[in-house]
Image (cartoon, rainbow, N blue to C red):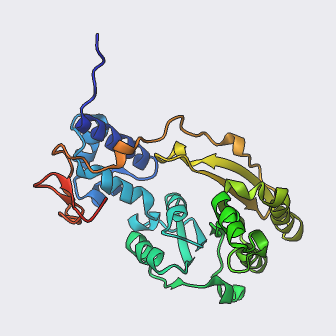
Amino acid sequence: MSAKIPREDSVSTAHSRDLLRQARQRFTQQQIAAHVGKDVKTVRRWEKGETPCPAMLDATLRELLSGSERAVGTPARFRFVDLFAGIGGIRLGFEAHGGECVFTSEWNPFSNKTYLENHGDRHAITGDITVVPAADIPDHDVLLAGFPCQPFSIAGVSKKNALGRPHGFECTTQGTLFFDVARIIAEKRPAAFLLENVKNLLSHDRGRTFDVILQVLRDELGYDVHYRVIDGRHFTPQHRERIIIAGFREPAAFTWDALALPDEGPRLASILHRTDGTEPLLPADGDRFFDHRARRVQPKYT
C-alpha cells in the first residue's frame, strides 16, 4: 500500500493551525480577531477545526508573533539593544517574547535598508558603533550582539592568511569590535546579554581568542556566562553552526541542556514560492515577487 502524500493546501492549513495555537498562548481570541480583521466566532471555528484556516492566516499570525506585544496594547516586558544587527534576525525572537528594541547599530547600508523594511523602526539606526559613547546608548535590560565573525571564521581566517593580513583580535577593523560590546556592557550593566558568532571562534588561535572573551565577560565584567554551539538546521533548511553566548548579571539557574531543539527543521521546498497555483495572493505584495497569472517567481529573483 502506497503512502498518501498530503496535499500542499492541507499542509499550509496545518501550519496555520500550529501558529494559531502558538498565538493563543499569548493572546486572547479577541486580540487575534482584531489583528487578522475577523470576528471572534471565526477565530473560534479555526481553533476548533470547524473551519479550515485561510491561506492569508499564516503570514498574518507570523507578523503577530514576531511583533511586540505592544501592538495589542500590552506594555513591553523588557527593553533591549540590537548591535551588529544585520537585518534583524536575532531581534525577532526577543520581540516575540514582549521585548522592545530601543537602539539599533548596523553599518552596512543594504542591511539597514532591509532592517527598516522588516521592522519599521521609530528610532534611527546608528552606523559605526566604535564612535558612539557607551553612556549615550539608552538603558536596557538585554544586550544582543552578533559581532562580526569574519576574523574568526574558517573562510575568513584562510582568506586573511592568504592575503597576509591579521585575523582575530589582531584584525583592527572587525576583530576588536568585541571590545566595543564589552565597554557597553561595562557602562550600562544590562541584566543579560546574548552574543552570537561562528563555531570557529571556539578554536581560533588554539582557543586563546575565546579564552580572552570569557576572561573579559566573566572575570572583568563579572557575568555568569554560558555558551553552546547550535546548528541552524533545526530552524532553517541549512547546515549552519553558530556559538551562542548567554550572560547574566546575577547568577542564574540557566543551562543550555534545557533547550529542546526540533529533530527536523523545515525543508527548502517549504519556504519557496509554490508554482502549482496555490501560492497565496498577499495584498501587500501583489505581483511584486510572484507572477500569479504565469505561476512563476518574477524573473529578476532567483
Looking at this rendering, what residue extends furthest in the right direction?
A: 219
Quadrant location of the C terminus?
bottom left
Q: Identify which residue is drawn at 60% across, 71% down.
A: 80
Quadrant location of the N terminus?
top left
Query: How many circles with numbers are drawn on the protein?
Result: 0
Judge whether residue 123 can be spotted in this image.
Answer: yes
Q: Position of residue 116 (x, y in %)?
A: 42, 76
Q: Position of residue 84 (x, y in %)?
A: 59, 73
Judge whether residue 151 can be spotted in this image.
Answer: no
Considering only vertical position in the picture, is 290 above or below 145? above
Looking at this rendering, what residue extends furthest in the top direction?
A: 1
Looking at the image, residue 88 sits to the left or right of residue 8; the answer is right
Q: Position of residue 12 (x, y in %)?
A: 29, 41
Looking at the image, residue 34 sits to the left or right of residue 278; the answer is right
Q: Position of residue 144 (x, y in %)?
A: 63, 67
Looking at the image, residue 257 sits to the left or right of residue 116; the answer is right
* Nearest to the observer: residue 266 or residue 217: 266
